[in-house]
Amino acid sequence: MENSVIQIAAEEMKKFGIRSKDLIARFDQNQFVVLLSDIGKKDLIHIAQDIHRSLELLKTKNTCLKDETKLVFSLGLSITLPDLDQYKDFLINKTQKALSESM
């Protein structure tokens, strides 16, 4: 069931502001990274809020989640300067830190 929930969550996240130049990927066993380029803070927060609301509603929309199943998630946000975007490790580390701080 865990993989089904992860697949459903990934599909749900793809619906929000993901353009062809953006990336959504499974980062760890139960973690995703969404890399959005050329986006401002206001738009980033809006997309994160949309994803958050959508994931909260997953339990009511999908039968693979049983009544007693609790879907727990957190979102971490990070914005870097355009010239730093080439440093993937830097961006991923900043995002991981933001995610850890959100828990």
Image (cartoon, helix red, strand yellow):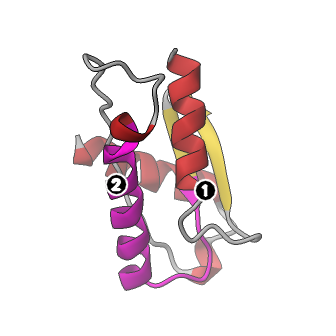
Q: Residues within 10 Å of mark 2 (few under 14, many from 20)?
A: some
Q: Earlier in the sequence, mark 2 or mark 1?
A: 1
| Magenta region includes residue 57 | yes
**Image quarter (top left, top right, bottom left or bottom right) of the C terminus:** top left
Q: What percent of the width, then of the height, locates residue 25?
A: 65, 45
Query: What amino acid type is highlighted by mark number 1?
Result: Lys
SS at mark 1? loop
Q: Residue at x 50, y 18 (%)?
A: 2
| Magenta region includes residue 41 | yes
Residue where numbered disc 1 is placed: 14
User: Which label was assigned to residue 60?
Assistant: none
Residue where numbered disc 2 is placed: 52
Where residue 45 sits, quadrant-wise, is: bottom left
Taking the image as shown, residue 81 lies to the left or right of residue 51, namely right
Residue 52, relative to residue 68: is it above or below?
below
Taking the image as shown, residue 78 lies to the left or right of residue 18, namely left
Q: Residue at x 60, y 33 (%)?
A: 7
Q: Residue at x 42, y 58 (%)?
A: 51
The residues tagged by marks 2 and 1 sit, at their Cα atoms, a distance apart of 12 Å
SS at mark 2? helix
Towards the viewer: 27 or 62: 62
Q: Which residues are magenta?
A: 34-58
Query: What amino acid type is highlighted by mark number 2?
Result: His
Q: What percent of the width, then of the height, locates residue 67?
A: 28, 20
Q: Residues within 10 Å of mark 1 (few under 14, many from 20)?
A: some
Towards the viewer: 24 or 4: 4
